[in-house]
Every structure is written in structure tokens, then in C-alpha cells.
Amino acid sequence: MCAIAGKLKWDEQRVSGEGVKAMCAHMAHRGPDDKGIVSLKHIVLGHRRLSIIDLSKNARQPMRTPDQRYHIVYNGEVYNFKSIRKELEGAGFEFRTSSDTEVVLYSYVHWGVDCLSRFNGMFAIAIWDAERRELFLARDRFGKKPLYYYSNKGKDFVFASELTALLKDKKDVPAVLSLEGLNCYLALGYILSPMTIYEDLHKLEPATYMMVSEAGVKKVRYWDYAAEFRNKTVEKDRDIAVRLLGLLEDSVKLRMVSDVPVGAFLSGGIDSSSIVCLMKNNHDNILHTFSIGFDIPSYDESIDAEKVADWLNTTHHKRILSIESGDIIDSAIAIYDEPFSDTSLVAMAALSKLASTQVKVVLSGDGADELFAGYITYTADKMYRFLAPVPHFVKETMYQLNRSIERLTPKHDTSGTKLSWHYKRKQFLNGILGCPEQAHYSWRLIHTAEERGEIMGAGHRELIHDTDPFHRFKKHYANAGGLNWLDRSLYVDAMTWLPDDILVKVDRASMSSGLEARCPYLDVNLASFAATIPAELKMRVLRKKHILKLALKDTLPAFILNKKKSGFSSPVGSWLGSSNGDEFKAFNRYVLTQKFGQSFMSPSPVLPLKLIP
């Protein structure tokens, strides 16, 4: 786990390394253990290291082949590197380290871009081929590890693990704010790949590799997740459950391979509890678990987490957050390098900081909701289909009534409850008049197009319409054409919400504290099998995660399996509505106006910026 950076200039024999040095220095938190930089013909590669596998100096990066043809900088972990290494040794390759970096490098030497189909892990890779004068970059299937880049019409190419790191190369990388990126942020609370908040800076999409040469830049998607859904298993329910549990056990074992201590995030819900339980079965030493609680009871899951920790006999650590936790607000602002307003970012930053005091690697339950239909949005999708026969004029009346209620209610929910009835009613009725895709999208929507016009100003109304992020959602829906409605929603969420919100939050928060977070549920073998499971087994009537609960029936006790899903979010609405909410209001204004372009907003916005409830 590390940070990578590089700069390629075709019109210079020796490229100045100052820009790459500045980028790496900016990302020192991602790799506090070591650093390295190499200057070659046309390119400079830089690296910051968080030592997890093979702690010796032999595993330092940038790493090269003995003939110096290939150089690699690499961020992440390929968990099945030991089996790949045996295959490469059989092909005649000799290794001088026990690191996965060397395995990744020789895999590319031996198989070329086809090596990506063999990797099971999370990664952002950059490999320079000096003979072909070609730069290869790739990102893992679900986008757990970030990779940003700037390309100047084939003349310059700059990349880094963080967006703000790119901006440290002030000589060649421009910083022009993107109105489309701003529109996307205001709509969703995050920015969809490949966009960023800057016009000419981009994210490399998940499951995509890029070849950069003097001939230009070519991007290729190497894995089609939608295709996995099209080959449904015909196994019996119980057999599916047994196979599913076996794959989850294998995934946890792989992710416990480390030369440093491994712990786990624990909320007390099914996802994290299942991971901790399986870790405990394969852990001879003390297992550290970590949770965050809140001083508002409806948001506080720390009691549930402690109950699970007691049952599993782990060494548990927790911290309770309140509005007075001002240091966490400041650190959260610094962590996220473009506008990002998932309310759980505050809690995730605190949780990562807490875990880093004891371990360098943690396992988390992220990804299970997208694989097995764990969100309330899927229940809403089913209710939408149930209401399909209702006459349009009745739905129109319900929609207009809801708009009237909204005009009379506060902008911030102060009920003190997580996912209040007010919020669920609003989100459901906002999508009731649209198509099924729009109904699902409405649950991700923070500001409507009308509201965004009031925030950005009337002069941007055409741009708001033309660059509406729903257009990108529709492309994903088209790629999943012909699938069951639930499978389509799961696929679209895995292409949008998961990589650009959930995994961004986890990566930035954990790496800000020099902590590696691993997600067993996003194992490629487990995820591919989950896609083949019939949709009706993932959601039985209104019971979410049915097949996962069946698989864990003999592993977890009833008090975990029957626990109502709470979700990992912070009580920002309550804090905003309280008399002491000024800090969060200031944070809200800072993110959009002070840090990311006040000039693009209406001088007197009618609406305040809202955070995701």
C-alpha cells in the first residue's frame, strides 16, 4: 500500500524530477515508511511506501527488472501473488524479494496486459517499458485504489494517487475548475469517474488499463462486470449458500496475509461481524477491532459492536464523537481532495485514526451491500414496481403533495434519527413519476436540477441540463440491458456509488492515517459468483441479503443476523440543526465556496449546500 506518481515528457530527454518529488512529498501520509524516485529517459517515477509485505529494502520502489527495461511503481495488494509467483518460477523467472510488487512486475513482463485477469486484489499500477517507450497504467476491478492523470495532447502525461498531488506540479498541470464536475457534485455529493472537479484532470476508471506512447493515449476496459450477471447458477439455495461462505472464508484468509499486524473495523452489523468472525477462526494472536460511536443514540452502533466483540473475545477499541470533535472536522476537510459530502467521512476519518494506533492493516465489510442488495434503495425499487399499476394522476397528486410538504419543512432534518421517515418519503416520491432508472437514481440525488440552478445561477441552467449525471447512469443501465431489475440496480451502484463514493471515503480516510483497508467482499471470485446468484435469492420479498444471511446462519448468532441495518453515517443533520452547529455549517460553506470556486456560484444562493442525510 503506497502512493505513486510520475511525469512523462516526449520532448525532453531528461525530465526534471521536481514536480514528482513535490507530488510524493504531498502524499507522504499514504507511504510514511519509505520513499523512492527514479529519473529515466523521458520519464520520472516516484513512490511513497507503506510497508506491508516484505519490509526489507529489497522491496523498495521504483523497482526494475535486472536488464533495466521495465520499471514499476505500484499501489495496493495482489492477494494471490504467491500462487502467481509459483507459476512464474515455473516459467523460469527468479525472484530476489518476497514482495507482491516483484510478482506484478514479472507478470506484466511475461503476460503483458493479460496479467490483469490473473490479479485478485486492489491496485493502481504504472510500468514503464524503456524499449517500447510505452507507459502502462491500470486500476483494479472495483476501483479500490485511486489513479488520477493529466494528458496534454500527447506532449505531457502526469499521474498520481491523489488529485491534489497532481496540482503540486504547478509548471505543467493546469487547475481549471470544471462546471460539469461541480454540477455532478451538487447532484450526488460526489463526482463520477472519469470526471474530477478540474476540467483537464481525470480519474482512470475501475477495471481499465491505459497505454501511453508517442502515438497517443489508449484506454481499454479489461473486465465487464455486467457479463457476470448473465450466467445465472442453477444450484439449490443451500448449495449456493455453502459455496458463498467458502468463497468468503477464502477471501478473508487471503487478506490476512501480512508482515504487520491486521485488525478489523467492527460496527456490529452482518457485514463487518462476518468478517471479524472468520478472521477470528484463522487468527492465533490477539485480534484488535475498532468502532466509532456518537452521542446521539439513534446513530450510535458502538454498543452493538461491543456486544459482537465480547462474543468473539476481541480486543476492542472505540471512540465516541460529538459536535465538539472539531479536530475531526478539520482533518476531514484536508483528506478529501475534491468536493465530497458523504456524511460518514467524518466518522471514517476518526475510525481510521483510532485503528492506526494499533495496526497497519484492517479488514472491512464494504461491498456486501452492493453484492447482496443491502440498501433501502432496493426496497424502494421494489415498491416502485408494486405501484406501477397506480394511475398516473394519483402519482402526480402524491408528488405535488410531497413538494408542498417540502416547502414547509426545514432544509435540515433535526429529528435525530438516521434515515428518517421524512427523508425516505421525500426520496421515494421524488422518483415516483419517472422511469424505474430515474426512481433508483432519485435515492442518490441531493439537489434537483432546479435547485442546482438556484445554487449555481440562472446562467448555468443549460449546462446543468446537458451535463446532468443521470446521463452517465443511463449508459451503465444500457450496459446492463436485459438483466433483472435488481441486478441492474446492483450493477449500476457498483459502477457509480461504490467506486466514486464508498471506496473513495475508505481509501482517503484510511490512507490519511497510514492505514491499509482491505475489503474481503470485493474479492473477484466472490463478487463474480455473487453476480450469478438469482436476484430473488438476494432479496426475498422485502428481506434484503437473504442468501448472505442463509450462508452465515451457522456462523453468526441471531442477534447479528436479525439486526436492522443502520448504515455508517454521522448525525450531520442533527448537528446542523443544533445551536452548536455553526462548525458544520462553516465546513459546508468551505467545501464548496472557499476551496472549490466561489465564482461559479450564484452570488446569493437560495439554498444552502446540503450533505447526504
Image (cartoon, grey):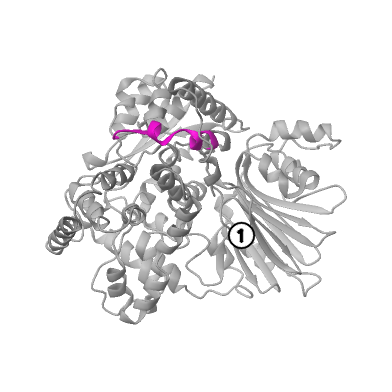
Q: Secondary structure at mark 1?
A: strand
Kindly identify the amino acid type of the residue bearing the numbered disc 1.
Ala
> Does 537 lie within the magenta span?
yes
Q: Which residues are magenta?
A: 528-542
Q: Quadrant of residue 99?
A: top right
Residue at image location 36% in from the left, 71% down from the top: 593
Q: Give x and y (percent) for residue 511.
A: 52, 48
Q: Residue furthest top?
A: 554
Q: Give x and y (percent) for residue 373.
A: 38, 39
Residue at image location 70% in from the left, 72% down from the top: 154
- Camera-side residue of 145 and 304: 145
- Per the image, the residue denoted by label 1 is 160
Within 10 Å of disc 1 (Cα), the crowding (few <14, some 14-19, many 20+) is many
Q: Is residue 175 left or right of residue 76?
A: left
- Camera-side residue of 470 and 483: 483
Q: Give x and y (percent) for residue 198.
A: 50, 70
Q: Quadrant of residue 133?
A: bottom right
